[in-house]
Image: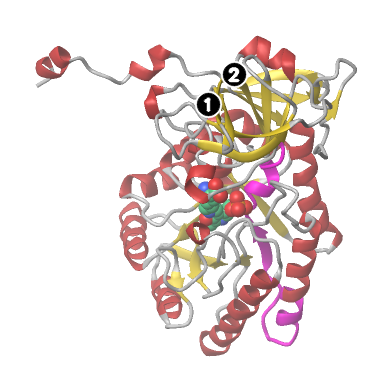
């Protein structure tokens, strides 16, 4: 199997990431353990940024922190000159704790609460991505009460279907996100926003889906949105400063996946926008994108310890590991596929096909079906690749399993960036029956 980034098999015959033997990490920090190849995250970020620079376009590459939000990760995003997409008070709070530059934070969400909007204004975030009419009127009221101004993008749904798993389609018209472009909703929203004293409409936003392998959807979305912008420019002289085309760039989870290079998505999108703008009275807007998965997805892997096994003769062999849907819910939720190797002997010849089960009390808690592996058993360490996006961020405490630790590996050094949850952490918010009675 081909290893990503700095991944290699070292002199001890172990898997190594960022110059660090992952067996040492498993011994020091325990399992399950998420390990990130920091150099690869930097490379991905620079790839996006450099392409915009090469094309001479003013741009922002905003890391969609929902993919993996933590203080150290957000500081890494800052080091690489990225902007930041947050979708909740919690993600915003994490960014603030990381001392991320507030003017480069974009606040998303289809149901921001009044408190969250105040929080965004208190911290003076760079822009709020407004999702619907009720948020628009709330923001109009809040800005007038506070006698302050906010910059916004209007999120529109251009009615483009990206070819990906149904659950992660967001660009189609029947979506909970955004103002529909075709029916005139988006136009009505723009008119309302332009009339509001406290609101400055920087431009439009769309996000057509996730794990997308082609550029067609992005190009169609850009064409459709710019078509509308031309009309609005003619009708009420609206000139957008920003066009945000979202994230969703696909990555290679298994050898079946064939994503494009990050640069190619950017090159084609920019060319289309330039072409569309060229024959109009619009001036070239800044182009913003919001990659999450393609910045951190293949830079992360999860180490598990193999425990029990079960053979169902003539059917399959199950190997169970010490994590599962509590640290990676994607196989259960999206039928997501992963590849894995034995970290303690990745070069051993493949001898059998096994299915990797998690330890949660649920039949659907399977991490990988039909994985070719050397003969493995209790004590072996399994490394599951490409778990860097939506792994930790969707981790949960089902069965009261503590969430794993997270380590950054770079240049031969490993740094713990999120501690493992303890059993004490699990009951930290619980009140005893007696405490509950007394608190009345
Ligand atoms: N921008 C917006 C407005 C989004 O809704 C998303 C993802 C992104 C950017 C980043 O998309 P990315 O580049 O990471 O594909 N939990 C699912 C993915 C949900 C994506 C939601 N929105 C998964 O594990 O596949």
Left of 385 or right of it: where is 136? left
Percent x, y for residue 291? Answer: 65, 52
From this view, report whether residue 122 is shown above or below residue 138. above
Q: Nearer the viewer, residue 187 or 208?
A: 208
Check the picture and name the quadrant holding the C terminus.
Answer: top left
Q: Is residue 32 visible?
A: yes
Q: Nearer the viewer, residue 412 or 82?
A: 412
The residue under label 1 is 323
Query: Which region is colored magenta?
Result: 273-299
Disc 1, SS: loop
Which residue appears farthest toward the right when viewing the image? 11
Q: Position of residue 164 (x, y in %)?
A: 59, 61
Q: Is residue 166 left or right of residue 279?
A: left
**Vertical comparison of 88 with 241: above or below:** above
User: Which comes before the other along the chain, label 2 or label 1?
Assistant: 2
Residue at (65% x, 42% y) in the render? 338
388 relative position to 322: left or right = right
C-beta proximity under 8 Å, tags 2 and 1 = yes
Camera-nearest residue between 102 and 129: 129
When asked about the image quadrant of residue 163, the answer is bottom right
* Relative height, residue 184 to residue 337 (above, below): below
- The percent coordinates of residue 438 (x first, y second) are 10, 15
Q: Residue at x 44, y 57 (%)?
A: 149
Quarter of the rendering occupied by the N terminus? top right
What residue does disc 2 label?
31
The number of discs equals 2
Residue 68 horizontal/vertical position (percent): 58, 38
Q: CA distance from mark 2 to mark 1?
A: 8 Å
């Amino acid at each position: 199997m081909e290893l990503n980034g700095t991944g290699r098999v070292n002199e001890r015959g172990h898997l190594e990431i960022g110059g660090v033997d992952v067996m040492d990490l498993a011994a020091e920090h325990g399992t399950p353990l998420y390990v990130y190849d920091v150099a690869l995250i930097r490379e991905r970020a620079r790839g996006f940024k450099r392409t915009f620079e090469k094309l001479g376009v003013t741009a922002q590459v905003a890391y969609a922190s929902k993919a993996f939000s933590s203080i150290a990760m957000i500081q890494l995003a800052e080091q690489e000159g990225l902007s930041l997409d947050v979708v909740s008070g919690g993600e915003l709070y994490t960014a603030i704790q990381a001392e991320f530059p507030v003017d480069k934070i974009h606040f998303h969400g289809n149901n921001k609460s009044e408190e969250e909007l105040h929080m965004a204004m208190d911290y003076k975030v760079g822009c709020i991505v407004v999702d619907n009419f009720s948020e628009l009127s709330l923001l109009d009221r809040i800005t007038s009460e506070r006698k302050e101004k906010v910059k916004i993008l209007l999120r529109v749904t251009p009615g483009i279907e990206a070819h990906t798993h149904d659950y992660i389609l967001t660009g189609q018209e029947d979506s909970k996100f955004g103002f529909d472009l075709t029916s005139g909703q988006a136009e009505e929203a723009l008119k309302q926003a332009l009339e509001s004293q406290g609101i400055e409409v920087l431009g439009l936003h769309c996000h057509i889906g996730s794990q997308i392998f082609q550029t067609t959807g992005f190009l169609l979305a850009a064409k459709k949105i710019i078509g509308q912008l031309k009309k609005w420019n003619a009708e009420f002289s609206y000139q957008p400063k920003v066009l945000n085309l979202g994230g969703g760039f696909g990555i290679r989870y298994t050898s079946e996946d064939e994503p494009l290079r990050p640069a190619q998505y950017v090159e084609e999108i920019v060319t289309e926008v330039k072409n569309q703008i060229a024959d109009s009275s619009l001036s070239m807007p800044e182009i913003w994108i919001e990659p999450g998965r393609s910045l951190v997805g293949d830079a992360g892997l999860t180490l598990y310890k193999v425990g029990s096994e079960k053979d169902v003769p003539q059917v399959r062999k199950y190997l169970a590991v010490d994590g599962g849907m509590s640290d990676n819910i994607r196989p259960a939720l999206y039928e997501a596929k992963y590849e894995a190797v034995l970290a303690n002997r990745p070069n051993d010849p493949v001898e059998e096909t096994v299915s990797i089960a998690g330890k949660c009390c649920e039949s659907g808690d399977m991490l990988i079906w039909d994985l070719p592996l050397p003969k493995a058993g209790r004590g072996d360490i399994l490394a599951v690749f490409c778990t860097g996006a939506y792994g930790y961020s969707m981790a949960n405490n089902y069965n009261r399993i503590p969430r794993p630790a997270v380590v950054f590996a770079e240049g031969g050094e490993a740094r713990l960036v999120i501690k493992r949850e303890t059993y004490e952490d699990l009951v930290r918010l619980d009140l005893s029956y007696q405490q509950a009675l007394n608190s009345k």
